[in-house]
Amino acid sequence: MSDADADGPTETVGEVRADGGSSDDSGGAFGSAIERGEDVPLLTGSGEYTDDISLRGTTHLAIRRSEHAHARIEGVDTSDAEAIDGVIAVFTGEDVVESGVPNTIPTAWDLPGLVQPQYRMLATDKVRHEGTAVAAVVAETRHAAHDAIEHVSVEYEPLEHVTDPVEAVERDVPPVHEEAEDNVAFDFELGDADATDEAFADADRVASVDLRQPRIIPNAMEPRAALADWEEATGKLRLWMTSQNPHLHRMLLSAGTLGLPENKIQVIAPEVGGGFGSKIYHYPDEAVTAWCSMQLGRPVKWQATRSESYLTDCHGRDHVTTGEIALDDDGTIRGVRVETHAGLGAQLSQFGTATPSYLYATVLSGQYTIPAIHCRVVGAFTNTTPVDAYRGAGRAEGIYVIERLVDVGARELEMDPAELRRRNLVQPDEFPYESAAALVYDSGEYERAMDLALEHVDYDALRERQRELRDEGRYLGIGIGNFIESAGLSPSGLAGDLGAQAGGWESSIVRFDSTGSVTVLAGTADQGQGHRTTYAQVAAEELGVSVDDVTVVEGDTDRIPQGMGTYGSRSASVGGGSIARGAREVREKARRIAAHQLEASVDDIEFDEGEFHVAGAPDRSLHIQTIAHEAYLGHDLPEGMDPGLEETNFYDPENFTYPFGTHVAVVEVEPETGEIEIERYVAVDDCGEIINPMIVEGQVHGGIAQGIGAALYEGAAYDDEGHLRTRRMDEYAVPHATQLPDFETDNTVTPSPHNPIGVKGVGESATIAATPTVVSAVADALEPFGVEHLDMPITPESVWRATEGDR
Amino acid sequence: MSEHSISVTVNGTQHELTVEPRTLLVSALRDELGYTGANVGCETGRCGACTVRENGETIKSCTRLAVQADGAEIETVEGLADDGDLSALQERFQEHHGLQCGYCTPGMLMSADTFLRENDDPSREEIREAIEGNLCRCTGYQNIVDAIEATADQLGEQR
Ligand code: FES
Ligand code: FES
């Protein structure tokens, strides 16, 4: 970036390009589809995931979990397990209590009136969901540990259980927690109830939909794992773990759980095999691993089996919702009213409270001007695996509701769903746009992206073809999904006002060494997003060096002092923003050194592709990498300047960023068999400035796959005993290669005006978009059968049932 | 528990080791011999992260006991690159962004590499079928299919 835009791309706000990706024609580092630096170790098998790491004397932990959904623990007998060859120790919940550590798994987000029951590493009184950790066995080998957990005998008094969030609140069942007799953890409201009632009373028409958003199990391909090494002599804990946010894990482990100062805990996230939310949280299991190492003074490793992942990785979604939309005959949306029961599972996970409240209700305005919105969410305890953020977290659930409502509204008005959307879009000159759901959108050109998506499918011709095919008894469906995302969690002050127990800033260090190479230490943590490449691009662009000169380090709390981690589509905008700001400070210090050594005034020093030169005298110049050397020599620096060339930056964003776009799915549904074929899938995403178009496209592809998965294949289910029915990979349908089509992607570029590099983020966008898009397409195909809505996952059976009477 | 002595050749190097009868091939490779490229995603033969080649055929090494591999020639992802030079398939994976977190990648590469030996001019449909047993949660598969297709094209041109 040259000096002209040193303040970021603010001046280009409103400019929109539909250029298929690259946002920089100059061929510079920022905007190029360069190959990823992280790939070679991963392609050759040398990359190290947690389970690939072993220390001398490593022991193995296996965790005994409850097979009951809800039961009182009457007694735990460990003697048989202890007698097994190779077993070193067997610990129960009482042992953890007796050790005197704080022993809480804390919630990171408070809400008014929130009931916060105790959550311990190992259960002592009751088990509240199948899979609750009850005892821990440490043995010399993994086999021995797994053998031994079978021999821990736990005596239970089973209790009646409940798995459905509506039943939990409305039926008379024994409470999951005594503190919440009616199983209500919180009762949350957002928006203006009176204004909404009025809008509904005044409007010409009202349409509504009852819907369920089933539980999704994240299914990162690498199951969670931890390796803990307690060093008695120094009182220091080293913990390698599958973490999206090592610093947050350090913080949560420190005071709440283990009672160690932060500076005595080193959390290392090595290669992490996918997360999608599931590796954000502070789970009992990793904490138990650390605690066992502290008891035994030996390294302890825990590797979840896939069944353990299904039972214990936080699930996503679990909403039961009634939504209503008030419309005038001309298609003006007057109001939206939503009531949701959100299943929280048996315990409050870190963001389990934030996800169905603030992250959900606040996006219910979608891309539309809606004068009145009201949303109520009842958060319910159930005897199920805790629920927390899964890719799209809250925003996905909210956009699903508003997009379904717009579709049923269009049906009610007999208006084309694209037209109804168009009539209500927030217009470019209305930004910053304050929605009735309490967000201030940063920038957007919604209609531009929607038009581009519709052009890609040739919308009018497609509708024509749909009519023709219907005459032949074939059912084509066109689904449109408009979305926004509130990304880039989050302005700390705002987050604090809403109940967050942590800040939303990000931190980085940008450091030249004396040979002119650059190290970027970033507080976020990658699980496949390619940070090491994109961050190098950001730094290289700001510093005028080659991407190859930049090394990015992430995922180690001893090397990177502070950070918040990777979730909520925040890394590019908040992490990248921090790096850009740090790099600019480094560049300005270098400029002052250059001015001093070139004997010119600082204002006369221009910077171009790494070279500082005196204005009007291009041959009087010094390269920034030469200055790096000078900065460490310290022989000839400006009066009073400290040596060295590095900066630590904390960046606290002033607002969320708001990625947006339109996805279109074209499906053909065969009512006789219920089969759904995705003929085309078009995604137009606007994530602001694009650092690396190849990586952005990859994020979009993966996001669509997960959105289609939710719409058509996935979903956790519990049986009548409260047992998870989908507990193996052959029972839970992660889409495979033959179940997904090729995707067609395109971009518009509307920079975020407040982000230092104009980016908005893209990690979750496509998952948010794809789910309503595909459901909309199937419902559209089945319009002749009077089908307005089908709940996810839409299986051949559900299609067949919905159309049965009409065939 | 009784132990068995077995001998397996991995990427051309012969190894002698003792294993319990129940030790899985994937555990023997990873924990005993240090070939940690093959990953464990499910241990039930469903995800394909542990895919290796045994005597020229791809197998899911979590569905094989180590003792069954006594005397076998095993090839793992560590053997794909030649003296540090990536194979054409590995290069195309990088070029087409066919991996994100990389956890599925070793298995995906072994399946694709074997498939391309059998079918050097595949359709996209055939490629998708060939990797149906390898789950990837990150990429949505399209770039993986692109990478395999591009490798096939390249190998076709070289013929
Ligand atoms: S680990 Fe072998 S197939 Fe999943
Ligand atoms: S790249 Fe992450 S599972 Fe395939």
Image (cartoon, rainbow, N blue to C red):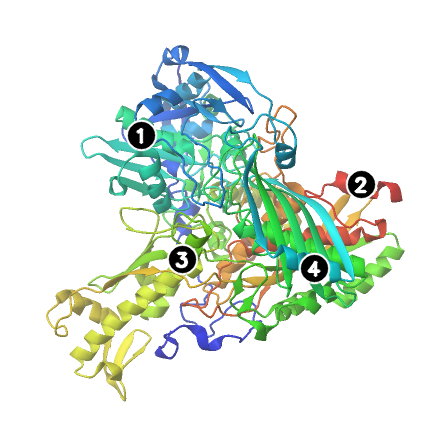
Tags 1 and 2 in contact by the CB under 8 Å rule? no
Instruction: Measuring from the top left, give residue A19's x and y in whole percent.
Output: 56, 71
Amino acid type for the residue under numbered disc 2? Trp
Do marks 1 and 2 both belong to one polypeptide chain?
yes
Please determine whether, in this image, residue A468 is positioned above or below residue B8: below
**Disc 4 target residue:** A198
Q: Earlier in the sequence, mark 3 or mark 2?
A: 3
Identity of the residue drawn at 57% across and 30% down: A727
| Label 4 Cα neighbours within 10 Å, binned few <14 / some 14-19 / many ≥20 | few
Give amino acid for label 1.
Val
| Residue A800: numbered disc | 2
Badge 3 is on which residue? A493
Q: Which residue is mark 1?
A: A101
Q: Nearer the viewer, residue A438 or A105?
A: A438
The residue positioned farthest toward the left in the image shown: A635
In front of the other: label 1 or label 2? 1
Q: Nearer the viewer, mark 3 or mark 1?
A: 3
